[in-house]
Image (cartoon, rainbow, N blue to C red):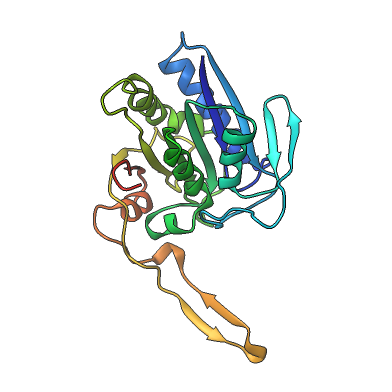
């Protein structure tokens, strides 16, 4: 039986993780219809966005069963992977993290809890994929299209992670996927592209206000970008796939 673990950094009640559950289920039905599988969710009990690879070390963690096969942890996304692996002994074959409400592109991977969960899984020898959805204020937020937009990519990830796991050395893919901020109504699935991760820092304006309070302002949507890399491609309306197998 194929054992799949889902997590995120927006919290177990976030719509993105429910969209991820539907996306993985749809991809299995399309690409591996004869596969026996089990999906277990272990996710933070609340939003832990931008916590990077942090872990809780000052107190014991608590895990609660929300409903069958859905469990919350009062810790970070990386804590969730460790609780699932070491404490719950789930031993998943694959890990999916997301779908994050907002892009995780370029240097955002340094602070992304969504990507950190996938990276932690990969460090434990588990193939992992992080998925995020770029958002813009002028495009209404929706999730229903996610299974259609992710089906082909998840199918390819299954092939890379499962069908090649007996290779020498075993295939341990670590993928970072971003969906673009385009209206899903009346269009086909956006073009998919494999691309490298952008290396440009994000410009910020920092000010120190009365009382010493520091404020940073930035325009995320106008951030600098390198040609052909994930920021430019996703901002241009494409689904981006960055394969980081040899980096982490």
Numbered-mark total: 0
Residue at screen point 53% across, 76% down: 216
Name the foreground residue: 183 vs 197: 197
Say if 11 sits above or below 87 in the image.
below
Residue at screen point 57% across, 19% down: 38
Q: Residue furthest top?
A: 34
Left or right placement of residue 209 versus residue 216 in this view = right
Q: Quadrant of residue 70?
A: top right
Give the x, y percent position of residue 161. 37, 27
Say if 38 sits above or below 17 in the image.
above
Asked whether residue 19 is in view, the answer is no
Asked whether residue 214 is in view, the answer is yes
Name the foreground residue: 185 vs 239: 239
Residue at screen point 42% across, 46% down: 180
Left or right placement of residue 200 versus residue 1 in this view = left
Say if 247 sits above or below 220 in the image.
above
Residue at screen point 42% across, 45% down: 178
Name the foreground residue: 8 vs 78: 78
Give the x, y percent position of residue 190. 37, 38
């Amino acid at each position: 039986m194929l054992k799949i673990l889902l997590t995120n950094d927006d919290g177990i009640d976030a719509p993105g993780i429910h969209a991820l559950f539907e996306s993985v289920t749809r991809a299995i039905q399309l690409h591996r219809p004869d596969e026996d599988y089990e999906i277990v969710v272990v996710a933070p009990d609340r939003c832990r966005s931008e916590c990077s690879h942090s872990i809780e070390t000052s107190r014991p963690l608590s895990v609660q069963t929300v409903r069958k096969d859905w469990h919350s942890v009062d810790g970070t996304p990386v804590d969730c992977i460790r609780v699932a692996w070491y404490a719950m002994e789930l031993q998943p074959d694959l890990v999916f993290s997301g779908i994050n409400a907002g892009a995780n592109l370029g240097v955002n991977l340094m602070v992304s809890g969504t990507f950190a969960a996938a990276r932690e899984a990969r460090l434990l020898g588990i193939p992992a994929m992080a998925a995020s959805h770029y958002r813009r204020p002028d495009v209404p937020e929706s999730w229903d299209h996610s299974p259609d937009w992710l089906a082909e990519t998840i199918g390819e990830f299954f092939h890379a992670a499962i069908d090649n796991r007996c290779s020498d050395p075993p295939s341990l893919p670590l993928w970072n996927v971003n969906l673009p901020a385009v209206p899903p109504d009346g269009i086909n699935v956006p073009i998919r592209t494999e691309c490298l991760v952008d290396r440009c820092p994000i410009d910020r304006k920092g000010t120190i206000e009365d009382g010493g309070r520091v404020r940073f302002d930035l325009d995320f949507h106008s951030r600098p970008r390198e040609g052909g890399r994930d920021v430019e491609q996703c901002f241009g309306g494409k689904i981006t796939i960055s394969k980081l197998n040899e980096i982490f």
